[in-house]
Amino acid sequence: MIDAERLKILTESAKYDVSCSSSGSRRKNEGGIGNASFGGICHSFTPDGRCISLLKILLSNRCAYNCLYCPNRAEADVPRASATPDEICELTMAFYKRNYIEGLFLSSAVEGSPDATMAKLVDTAVRLRKVYNFHGYIHLKGIPQADKALISRAGLYADRMSFNVELPAERSLRLLAPQKSREGILSPMKQLALEKAAVKEDTAKARKRFLPAGQTTQLIVGASPETDGQILKLSEALYRRFSLKRVYFSAYIPVVHHALLPDTCTGLLREHRLYQADWLLRFYGFTAEEIAPEGENLPEEYDPKCAWALRHMQFFPIEINKAPLEALLRVPGIGTLGAYKIVKARKFARLGFGDLAKMRIVLKRAKHFITCGGKFYGSENVTSVKNLLMLEERSGRYEQLSMFSTPETSLSALTGQL
């Protein structure tokens, strides 16, 4: 069994990778231990909504690479430790049986070579499935430039995999992570996407359940000079080309000081704005160029959807009882659920502002961009609308959601602003 000192080193070293969440897998128990759930199997969350019930650990933090931003880089003076595949398996099973965790997120520094490290990661997953009979959730962080056969084998035993892009531009990657290459990272992502698509078309192979929860990746925000527009354009391309489940953003923290790196942390607000923009990309029909031009950053004063609406006031106000779904989704204060409720309800009756309040539409925002039966209760002055939206942001009402947030759903609270 792994000792406490090594466990502390290997779990502490893994905390900077945020590209993990345990959902999207339908793996079922086949006479062993554990299940994975499509809707999410985790039961513990941080205040900003991130899941923490996975055992998040490295096989080793002894890295042959010297990525300047990484706390485990070769030249860093930090405690080093490694674990064997069996030690990780025993730890996972022990924690699972005690109900500490619901799954495993396993990564590793490049110890020796990419192939040797990837082989150990795959061996751990295979042992968990075959020897320890574990059917719970497994997320493997792949090693770029590893052998293609190893990557394919990993997809047969892991629920999800991630190859972290880390830096948005090739130039930054060459400067800050000289042993890595853009092609070395994107190539295995493409390989997994093609293999997963092929498995879906072959019912015989589908029984192997190749990578049922898909792929994710991580981008570090602020370690290099790329703008939010460039980051979102890359994210959009990754979703389109590789059918990624999520792109995670990690605000840069200067845990390692170097002349080529910023001395200060990237604000969490910038990270939050990117997650809001990512939501617009995935669920609201926006393009990266619409959200933020390539050379620009997202505004801090209000969220990206409000920013787009304020730049396109000629598009508003729209009539709630007539506007198509695509237009409703672009109204600040109307989410996807609210938009679908509106489209469904107006088939049976003409909607008014009171009806929207009952649907939990955020009328403080939406009223500036909509009419109901020709009635308009917002401000026609763009500067006034901007100021009101900024005041709402500063009030703290609209923050990054956590699992423990209690939304204000009072009808009087919603309609009192009309």
Image (spheres, rainbow, N blue to C red):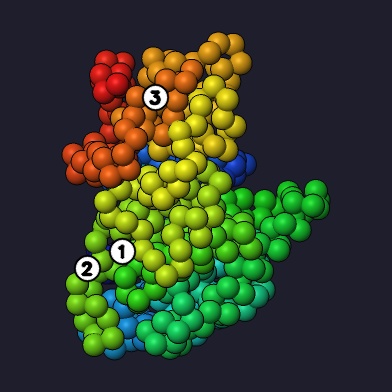
Q: Amino acid at mark 1?
A: Ala
Asked if residue 222 lies left or right of residue 280, the reply is left
Looking at the image, residue 130 lies above or below residue 330: below
Looking at the image, residue 275 lies above or below residue 172: above
Of marks 2 and 3, which one's residue comes earlier in the chain?
2
Q: Amino acid at mark 2?
A: Cys
- Residue that badge 1 annotates: 251
Name the secondary structure under disc 3: loop
User: Alpha-carbon distance for marks 1 and 2?
Assistant: 7 Å
Contact (Cβ within 8 Å) of mark 1 with mark 2: yes
- Residue that badge 3 annotates: 376
Q: Which corner quadrant holds the N terminus?
A: bottom left
Q: Which residue sits furthest front?
A: 381
Name the secondary structure under disc 1: strand
- Is residue 140 visible from the viewing direction of this image? no
- Is residue 211 visible from the viewing direction of this image? yes
Instruction: Find residue 145 and report its horizontal and vertical position in percent.
Output: 56, 80
Instruction: Find residue 367 and report its horizontal and vertical position in percent.
Output: 37, 29
- Residue that badge 2 annotates: 265
User: Alpha-carbon distance for marks 1 and 3?
Assistant: 40 Å
